[in-house]
Amino acid sequence: MLHGFPIALGYFSVSFGFGIVAVQSGLKAIEAVIISLTNLTSAGQTMGVAIIAAGGTLLEMAATQLVINLRYALMGISLSQKLDKSFTTPHRLLAAYGITDEIFAVAAAQDCKLVPAYMYGMISVAAAGWVGGTLAGSVANMLLPVSLTAAMGIMLYGMFVAIIIPPSKTDHRILSAIVIAAILSCAFKLWLPDVSVGFAIIISAIASSVIAALLFPVDSEETEENEQ
């Protein structure tokens, strides 16, 4: 739960902006809260609200969410390698609900095996911050200027940068993976604009991870020390 509090504080400010956007798009405050409670994804929720406001079809909604949130499947597969034996299938299904970029990063950074209680504690606090911020933003929709609402859109990326910068200062392998991913992402943006954002993120993440793993493999001695 302690590891979830910093995430919750960041989520509160970001989802505050989402609450404002959702109400401005024609949704009720309770509808915005339900979306945040059942999704936990800023990009997916923002795009979903845009499709709702534009009168899009359910098929369009499903396809868009699949593309945007497909990265969470990769995160779940990655975290599965760190789970304790007590993580039965029901626990895996419940914990999968709360896998986000920040929760994945914090969980993956732990040196020990992950147990259900740890994941539930972190997810419950983080989710409370996300839902609470959505509610507060929905209620305060009429009080804040549009310029402030637009500025809140970059806060999620700021939180993620704050998570990856500290370990990259001490581990050149992490820094290398980050730099490679950034270069690939920019390449998609500049030269392959037709590739959707979701697929660009997935390809960049996989490619940077593979390249970094090939260039800087972890030797067996270091692996044994981390496990101990």
Image (spheres, rainbow, N blue to C red):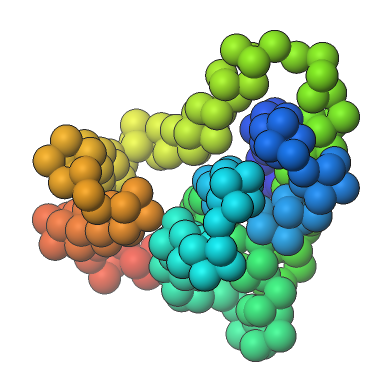
Residue 16 visible in image: no
**Residue 20 image position (x, y, % from top left):** 73, 30
Vertical placement of 182 versus 200: above or below?
above
Vertical placement of 32 versus 72: above or below?
above
Vertical placement of 72 versus 134: above or below?
below
Of residues 200 and 103, the one nearer the viewer is 200
Query: Residue shown at 56%/19% (left/top)?
Result: 151
**Residue 45 image position (x, y, % from top left):** 61, 49
All told, the count of numbered labels is 0
Q: Quadrant of residue 183?
A: top left
Query: Residue shown at 81%/33% (left/top)?
Result: 138
Query: Residue shown at 55%/56% (left/top)?
Result: 56
Of residues 164 and 199, the one nearer the viewer is 199
Residue 8 falls left or right of residue 46: right
Q: Residue furthest front?
A: 55
Query: Residue shown at 22%/49% (left/top)?
Result: 194
**Residue 118 image position (x, y, % from top left):** 71, 62
Residue 156 visible in image: yes
Of residues 169 and 39, the one nearer the viewer is 39
Residue 62 falls left or right of residue 24: left
**Residue 169 image position (x, y, % from top left):** 34, 31
